[in-house]
Image (cartoon, helix red, strand yellow):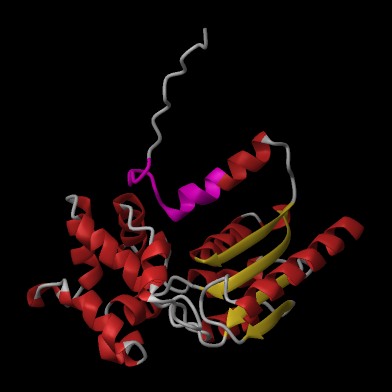
Amino acid sequence: MTKEVAAVPKPLGKLKGNNTWALIDDIRTISLRLDIHRFALFGGSWGSTLAAAYAIEFPRTVAGIVLRGIFLATDKEIDYFYKDGFNGVGIYIPEQWERYISHVPIEYRHNPLSYYRRGISKGDKNLAHELARYECANLHLIPTSPEELEKDIDSSPEMALIEAHYFTNKCFMYENHILNNATAIPVDIPITIVQGMYDLVCMPINAKLLHDALPSSTLHWTVAGHSSRDPETTKKLISETDALYDKIKNS
């Protein structure tokens, strides 16, 4: 007779103690538990933020870094995509912007993402879907069909709530934390930045700013949007990760 194992509850969508610094501590704790003293970091979009923030806090544990679709977690970037409308990303995606903002009453449009967060936290699945759809619709260089878009959307309320939680709290970092502290990352760490030239989600200038702040980094521009699945970006990420592996193995 097979012994039944009780399901272990997981804190999916829980916000208490859920912040950037806790995630950094998690990475450090896991690496120590596994007795891994140096390792490579690979992150895209918000993952690039977390990877850079970790490298600033624990630079000597980092053997190398590959970053994609740079997000520096500044007010300007968050407002550009979620707030500024036709003074931000709405210039390029007017129909997507109008759909996103149409779900926000006029009196809350000074801070649309906060309205989305409140609604999602109260169980509004439609707002969770629309927030996820807004981002997914703008990921690729070549937009997907409406049918494919719906398949790609992760509209789980938990994921949407966590995303809104981080961005309405400025990712729990001081303004320009990454650029202001980039010198904490040693120049002998190999760093590659891969950035889609037509990224609508994370402004391409971010990659240039981070590259300038990390003199030993290499910046590769790809004919791509934000998604790691755009072919040129995928190819470059694979080749750069392979190259980093060889550097670490032979060092």
Q: Quadrant of the C terminus?
A: bottom right
* Range drawn in magenta: 12-26
Which percent across, then down, holds residue 30? 61, 40
Find out whether residue 16 is within the magenta segment: yes
Q: Position of residue 190 (x, y in %)?
A: 76, 69
Most extreme residue toward the right is 250
**Residue 29 appears left or right of 84:** right
Give the quarter of the image for residue 93: bottom left
Q: Residue at x 33, y 47 (%)?
A: 15
Residue 84 makes an appearance in the image? no
Left or right relative to 215: residue 86: left
Residue at the far front: name it.
Answer: 147
User: Is residue 81 visible in the rendered structure shown here?
Assistant: yes
User: Which residue is at 46% across, 75% downward?
Assistant: 139
Q: Residue 56 sits in which quadrant? A: bottom right
> Does the segment drawn in magenta span residue 177?
no
| Position above or below: 7 against 119 | above
Q: How many marks?
A: 0
Q: Residue at x 47, y 74 (%)?
A: 176
Q: Is residue 225 above or below residue 163?
A: below
Asked if residue 162 lies left or right of residue 31, the reply is left
Residue 163 position, x and y percent, is 36, 60
Of residues 232 and 83, the one nearer the viewer is: 232
Where on the picture, by quarter, is residue 201?
A: bottom left
Residue 79: x percent and y percent?
Answer: 32, 78
Q: What residue is rendered at 29% in x and 91% in y?
A: 87
Using residue 168 as the reference point, say whether residue 56 is left or right of it.
Answer: right
Whether 64 is drawn above or below 107: the answer is above
